[in-house]
Image (cartoon, grey):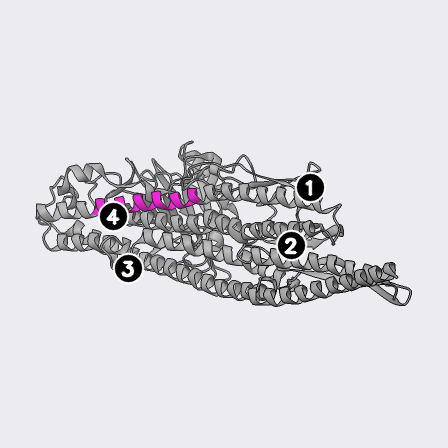
Amino acid sequence: MSLSQALNAAVSGMRTTQTGLALVAGNVANADTPGYVRKTLDQVAVAAGEVGIGVRAAGIDRQLDIYVQRQLQVETTGGSYADLRADFYQRLQQIYGQPGGDNALETIFNNFTSAVQSLTTSPDSNAIRNSVLGAAQVLTQQLNGMTVDIQGLRTDCENGLGNAVDEANQALQRIADINQQLGPLTSQDGTAAVLRDQRDNYINQLAELMDVRVVAGDNNQVSVFTTSGVQLVGLRASQLRFDDRGVLSPQSAWSADPTQRSTGTITLLSPNGGKVDLLASKAIRSGKIAAYLEMRDQVLPQAQAQLDELAAGMASVLSDRTQAGTPVVGPPAGFNLDVGGLKAGNKIELTYTDSTTGAQHQVTIVRVDDPTALPLADSATPNPADKVIGVDFSGGMASVVSQLNTALGSTLMQFSNPSGTILQVTDDGGTNKIDVTAASTTATASTLTGGSAELPFFTDANTPYTGAITSIGPQSKGFAGRISVNAALAADPTRLVVYQTSPLTPAGDATRPNFLYDQLTKATRDFSPQAGIGTVASPFSGSIGAYLSGMVSQQGEAASGADSLKQGQDLVVNSLRQRFNEAAGVNIDSEMATLLKLQTAYGANARVMTTVRDVINLLLQM
């Protein structure tokens, strides 16, 4: 090797070593910087012919495990989803109250039924009557307050979605900016490695918000997609938009139809002008955004629906009176039903048997005062076996008969109006193909002294609760937020006992108190499976107290399951983060060892340069 070659080799060694020293210094300085990945120098020998004449820095490597990084991003998405769900479930549990606590819903309901039970033994006690009304008012106020709190949680979700979209847009724009900056840079440029660290940090922020998939491209650039395949960012960033609807109510619901939607949706605007509703396309499946959506549109509305079912059940079991029809001797045989007292939402129930096959069929006829709500679906009642028919009563009895004969003519039942408000339903006469075996009406009591034990104890604000169905939904929707004790009953507590004025019910008569207690604690009622308790094929059937217990139990189990998922996901994320840091994190001891090696190499190259200088000087002196 000539002296010039030796000198060049030493110079290249010193330059490469200086680069290595700078990397070590950077590693040590950023040992505690979040998202920083340890850098190492990739160096290669430089040769001329068959003679090695130096060394050069081929590039700067980031020391990380790509597979672990990808897994960590996936599990981070799941972890943020699980953490947010668990937090909201915990807040929901606080609304229901600690089981057995004074403010727990079950405790307050039991206080009410206990007060009613006391009234059964002392119906003439003014103090106990007032106690019943006081306990009822506490119960209705609790249901009102829980509705406000649940809708408050939904509003928090709405606001959280808006904030998450803002964070996502910032991350997307920064990823696009870094992609563009990386384009002209080479792997030897230390700036490229720093930019890639920053980009990974923004991708991690995005992964906390939604499930993403990262695809590597040329020049260290990447494209980011949702796991469903929607591109979010490449060299240019898409823009997410969220149309926040502010404070939500029980009637607020998401819909793919913008004219029907009353909650915000997330729309992606791509750089080329494309537009995608990410909620309608189900593009976001995990992360904080998915958790917010699940709580806002599923979990919390279901909790509200259960409260509404409870409130509707309390009102209906105390006010609804079922009367069997009067038999009609045939042929044709059937029943007469007085439908004059039916209100919107009240119903007629029919049972007929196919004489040929012996099969029994059930039909539920519902009075509907809003024609735009027709036709009704069979799911309008909890009964999975009945056929539901909605009838508009506004046109009078002739119209009612015509609607029923049109809707149910295929069953061979015949409807007529022999007089007044009497609806007659009969079989097919002489052919004996069907037999009408049962018929009844269920109407809501509207007065406190109607001559029977039923009474409108609870009302919908100041109007009776009848279960009416309109084009905007059933009356039960949000009813827990409106339920109240009948103002007339609160003004005259004697009506807890007196159910008729002629003759006047004795002050010590326990008929109505016994009815109230039995209906609240023993009466069996079918509850809508759409609230999440029971199934369509087998709806929950039981007392008000049993439904309340099932509701609280289900919510408790869901909260426990959410917490278990959170703990398991946190364990996975922490384990992966530890594995990632083992490769990517900075170890000070290791860096110091590398520093010593570089110092030694630097000194050796400097010694070579000194020797070459001395030799050249000696030659010049000769």
Image side of residue 567 versus residue 117, left or right? right
| Image marks 1 and 4: residues in contact by CB distance under 8 Å | no
Q: Tell me where residue 42 sits by quadrant.
A: bottom right
Image side of residue 30 versus residue 333, left or right? right
Q: Main secondary structure of the magenta part?
A: helix
| Image marks 1 and 3: residues in contact by CB distance under 8 Å | no
Q: Position of residue 132 (x, y in %)?
A: 17, 48
Under tag 3, what secondary structure? loop
Query: Disc 3 marks which residue?
Result: 99
Which residue is rendered at x = 61% and y = 68% of the image? 593
Measure how far apart labels 2 and 4 are at the Cα level.
50 Å
Question: Which disc is residue 236 wearing?
Answer: 1
| Label whose residue precedes the other's in the sequence (4 or 3) | 3
Q: Which one is nearer the viewer's eye here, 97 or 370?
A: 97
Please name the amino acid that badge 2 sits on: Arg
Measure how far apart labels 2 and 3 are at the Cα level.
43 Å
| Label whose residue precedes the other's in the sequence (2 or 3) | 3
Range of residues picked out in magenta: 136-156
Q: Position of residue 288 (x, y in %)?
A: 51, 51
Query: Disc 2 marks which residue?
Result: 213
Is 474 situated above or below 73? above
| Label whose residue precedes the other's in the sequence (1 or 3) | 3
Query: Disc 4 marks which residue?
Result: 139
